[in-house]
């Protein structure tokens, strides 16, 4: 089965988490196997039991700096995922989806794949001085795609970063319901 | 009693809570006291929560402001809360998931544009408020009689929900994002 990796930082009640849930449902309904990677958070949250019931794999680990692990097993898992994503991601997953640009600092250099999709779930108005707090470095790879969930985000990103820095492709895809249905 | 519910975690990236304290102040100043604002969500940034409480105290509207202090799934909210109006911030015409979830559960959603640059983009349908003055006007009207407006809001909510379902072309497009380079299944 075709696997895709969906990366985020939380599975609590929230809009980004709802988007993740709909993407997972759509993937499953289309015979894809989504794997969810939650970074730097080990709590059991709202969607954990839901994904358990759906038999969707959820992995919680860290792929950036390894420190202060109390459990050798957690550290081992982290090492395995660092290696997996840095060296084998292309073989293992058809595509990588990062929900929330705020997660890019943890994954941008850690996941090597030529089909990475960065879902932007915020608008500029949510930030100080209407500026996204993300480094332009994260948008400099022409193989990556930024998925905007509304038309304003595309304009905002182009305006802030400019075409010189914004090499990633930009596409707009609306928030949706019914991802879990097959028709 | 008109109850306005705002579902949002109190956090750095949600910067509009004070708007509703201001709305409460304006309503009270106009002699309207039969209303309550309830913030439904966890407190992820204590300083922002404290600012809300502080301003409510300064403006003497604290009795009109409430907090659940934790995230509560909409379906599990008390019935009296469910009877209220679920206020959702928009960015121009863009509406996030919380509104759709509330509509899905048969709750009544109203909308406030949070971006002054996009006031003109706000749909002209019932319950859509391009700015704070429009929201104050809507709540004022609701306190004078709900049923006719409620019907229009329900129709508007229903149309909005329909717009979230994927067309065949959109399904194909989404699949091409998940499985790039492959033919649609």
Image (cartoon, rainbow, N blue to C red):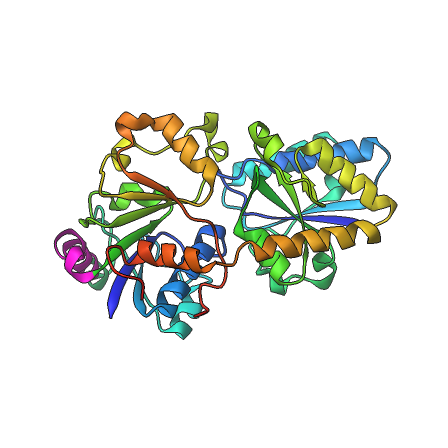
Residue B160 on image: x %, y %: 61, 52
Q: Vertically, is A170 above or below A159? A: below
Position of B38 with respect to B7 (left or right) is right
The span picked out in magenta is A76-92
Residue situated in front as seen by the camera: B152 or B26: B152
Position of A51 with respect to B56 (left or right) is left
Residue A20 on image: x %, y %: 41, 57
Dominant SS of magenta comes to helix
Q: Which part of the image, by quadrant, shows the C terminus of chain B?
A: bottom left
Which image quarter: residue A155? top left
Which image quarter: residue A7? bottom left
Q: Vertically, is A86 above or below A178? A: above
Residue placed farthest to the left in the image?
A: A87
Residue B49 visible in the snapshot: yes
Position of A12 with respect to A118 (left or right) is right
Which image quarter: residue A27? bottom left
Residue A119 on image: x %, y %: 37, 46
Picture residue at 21% right of the left edge, 46% below the top? A65
- In this rendering, the count of numbered labels is 0
Picture residue at 50% right of the left edge, 41% below the top? B11
Residue situated in front as seen by the camera: A115 or B46: A115
Residue B22 visible in the snapshot: no
Picture residue at 31% right of the left edge, 52% below the top? A97
Q: Is residue B80 a member of the stretch shown in magenta?
A: no
């Amino acid at each position: 089965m075709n696997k895709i990796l969906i990366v985020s930082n939380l599975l609590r009640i929230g809009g980004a988490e709802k988007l993740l849930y709909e993407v997972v449902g759509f993937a499953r309904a289309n015979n894809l196997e989504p794997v969810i990677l939650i970074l730097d958070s080990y709590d059991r949250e709202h969607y954990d039991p839901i994904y358990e019931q759906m038999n969707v794999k959820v992995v919680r680990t860290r792929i950036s700096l390894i420190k202060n692990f109390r459990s050798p097993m957690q550290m081992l898992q982290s090492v395995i995922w660092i290696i997996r994503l840095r060296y084998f991601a292309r073989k293992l997953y058809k595509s990588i989806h990062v929900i929330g640009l705020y997660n890019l600092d943890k994954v941008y250099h850690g996941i090597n794949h030529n089909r990475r999709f960065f879902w932007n779930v915020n608008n500029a108005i949510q930030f100080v001085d209407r500026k996204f707090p993300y480094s332009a470095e994260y948008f400099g790879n022409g193989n990556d795609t930024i998925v905007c969930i509304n038309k304003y985000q595309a304009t905002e990103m182009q305006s802030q970063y400019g075409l010189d820095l914004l090499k990633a492709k930009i596409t707009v895809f609306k928030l949706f319901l019914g991802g879990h249905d097959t028709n | 009693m008109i109850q306005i519910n705002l579902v949002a975690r109190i956090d750095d990236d949600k910067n509009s809570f004070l708007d509703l304290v201001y709305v409460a102040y304006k309503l009270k100043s106009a002699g309207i006291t039969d209303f309550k604002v309830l913030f439904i969500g966890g407190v992820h940034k204590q300083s922002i929560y404290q600012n809300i409480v502080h301003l409510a105290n300064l403006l003497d509207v604290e009795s009109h402001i409430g907090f659940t202090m934790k995230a509560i799934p909409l379906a599990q909210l008390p019935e009296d809360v469910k009877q209220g109006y679920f206020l959702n911030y928009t960015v121009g015409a863009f509406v996030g998931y919380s509104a759709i979830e509330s509509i899905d559960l048969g709750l009544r959603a109203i909308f406030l544009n949070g971006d002054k640059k996009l006031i003109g983009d706000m749909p002209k349908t019932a319950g859509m408020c391009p700015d704070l003055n429009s929201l104050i006007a809507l709540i004022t009207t609701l306190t004078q009689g709900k049923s006719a407006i409620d019907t229009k809001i329900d129709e508007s909510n229903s149309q909005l929900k329909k717009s979230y379902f994927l067309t065949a072309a959109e399904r194909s497009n989404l699949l091409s994002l998940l499985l790039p380079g492959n033919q649609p299944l």
